[in-house]
Image: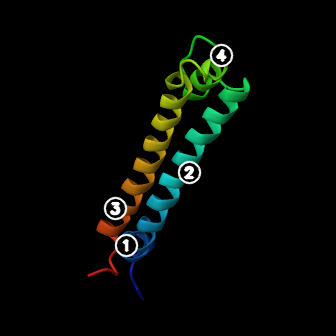
Amino acid sequence: ALGSRHWRIIWRHLLPNCMPSVIVLASLALARAILMESSLSFLGLGVSSPTPSWGFMMSTGRPYIATAWWLATLPGIAILITVLGINLAGDRIRDLLDPKVD
């Protein structure tokens, strides 16, 4: 690295070693944002009423849980599948891009 330009060092050595960690952190942050938005919408503090939200759907279906359980359960399952899929995709991309794994 002695005598190389700073941009060459960054692109050649720093970024290939940092990107797997950045991808995992970004996927975790996206999943956390989805969970926080849906929980705030469930409590009534999220997006406005005409905008669809899984948390609002769960909150709307909660009074009917005894007679129509799917109104509250299916949006929860959709949240679970989405968050799990994002986390697994981030881990898989990290495994593919990790230069230390053979």
Q: Position of residue 32 (x, y in %)?
A: 59, 47
Q: Which residue is mark 3?
A: 92
Query: Dot 4 surroundings within 10 Å: few (below 14), some, or many (20 or more)?
Result: few
In front of the other: label 1 or label 4? 4
Label 1 or label 4, whichever comes before in sequence order = 1
Label 3 or label 1, whichever comes before in sequence order = 1
Q: Quadrant of residue 97?
A: bottom left
- Name, please, the residue furthest toward the left: 102
Disc 3 element: helix
Residue drawn at the location 42% of the way across and 65% of the way down: 19
Query: Dot 1 surroundings within 10 Å: few (below 14), some, or many (20 or more)?
Result: few
Q: Position of residue 94 (x, y in %)?
A: 37, 65
Q: Are marks 3 and 2 in contact (CB under 8 Å)?
A: no
- Name, please, the residue furthest toward the front: 66
Q: Which residue is mark 4?
A: 48
Amino acid type, label 1: Arg
Disc 4 element: loop
Q: Which residue is mark 1?
A: 8
Q: Which mark is residue 29?
A: 2
Amino acid type, label 2: Ala
Query: Dot 2 surroundings within 10 Å: few (below 14), some, or many (20 or more)?
Result: some
In front of the other: label 2 or label 1? 2
In the image, 75 versus 66, the foreground residue is: 66
Residue drawn at the location 60% of the way across and 28% of the way down: 55
